[in-house]
Image (cartoon, rainbow, N blue to C red):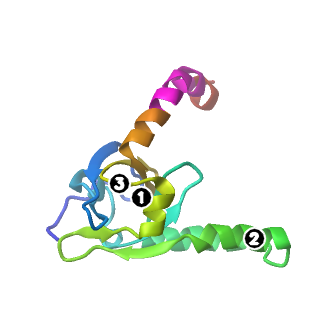
């Protein structure tokens, strides 16, 4: 993989990017999005089911930090704690870029998010959301009307 400029010291991803899954479910992460990651975060990832109808793609070091925080907060000696951790971790799959800079997405996770062909990648701070393009457009149409209200609620004085 060629050197990409890295312009941020902390993992802070943002933006919306179009991409495409090939027939074998391989995905190339667009260079502008990949360049936001430190070089050591650009090859190994973890893919997980998200609460929305999409997937979360974590750089491996970020995933490890998430698990550390999770295990510090959740009591595994309670049935609810074990169930939550089980659900959180069970759908996660490790992925690595191949020699052509592609990620092979597992079939079960693609089915969960309805991924087939055109996808949208959303930089969400320390992770990338992977959406089916049509599903994301539907979500955007439904939620665009909330933008002003949410700006006031979350960023207002």
Residue 116 marker: 3
Query: Percent x, y for residue 156?
Result: 60, 25
Mark 1 vs mark 3, CA separation in Å = 28 Å
Nearer-N-terminus badge (1/3) = 1
Residue 83 marker: 2
Q: Which residue is mark 1?
A: 11
Nearer-N-terminus badge (3/2) = 2
Residue 22 figure quarter: bottom left
For residue 116, above or below residue 142: below
Residue 46 left/right relative to 9: right
Q: Residues within 10 Å of mark 1 (few under 14, many from 20)?
A: some
**Label 1 secondary element:** loop
Asked if the stretch drawn in magenta spans residue 144, the answer is yes
Quadrant occupied by the N terminus: bottom left
Residue 80 marker: none
The range drawn in magenta is 140-151
Nearer-N-terminus badge (2/1) = 1
Asked if the stretch drawn in magenta spans residue 47, the answer is no
Q: Nearer the viewer, residue 154 or 141?
A: 141
Q: Is residue 147 visible?
A: yes
What residue lies at 28% left-to-right and 68% top-to-bottom? Answer: 24
| Eye-nearest disc, 2 or 1 | 2
Query: Percent x, y for residue 141?
Result: 46, 27
Query: Percent x, y for residue 8?
Result: 34, 55
Q: Nearer the viewer, residue 61 or 131?
A: 131
**Label 3 secondary element:** loop
């Amino acid at each position: 993989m060629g050197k990409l400029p890295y312009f941020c010291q902390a993992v802070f991803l943002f933006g919306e990017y179009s991409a495409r899954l090939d027939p074998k479910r391989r995905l190339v992460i667009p260079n502008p999005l990949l360049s936001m990651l430190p070089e050591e975060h650009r090859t190994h990832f973890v893919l997980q089911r998200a609460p929305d109808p999409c997937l979360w793609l974590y750089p491996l070091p970020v995933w490890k930090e998430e698990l550390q925080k999770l295990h510090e907060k959740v009591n595994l000696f309670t049935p609810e704690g074990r169930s939550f951790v089980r659900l959180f971790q069970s759908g996660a799959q490790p992925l690595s870029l191949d020699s052509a800079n592609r990620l092979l997405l597992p079939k079960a996770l693609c089915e969960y998010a309805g991924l087939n062909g055109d996808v949208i990648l959303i930089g969400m701070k320390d992770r990338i959301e992977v959406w089916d393009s049509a599903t994301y457009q539907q979500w955007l149409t439904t939620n665009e009307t909330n933008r002003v209200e949410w700006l006031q609620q979350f960023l207002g004085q």
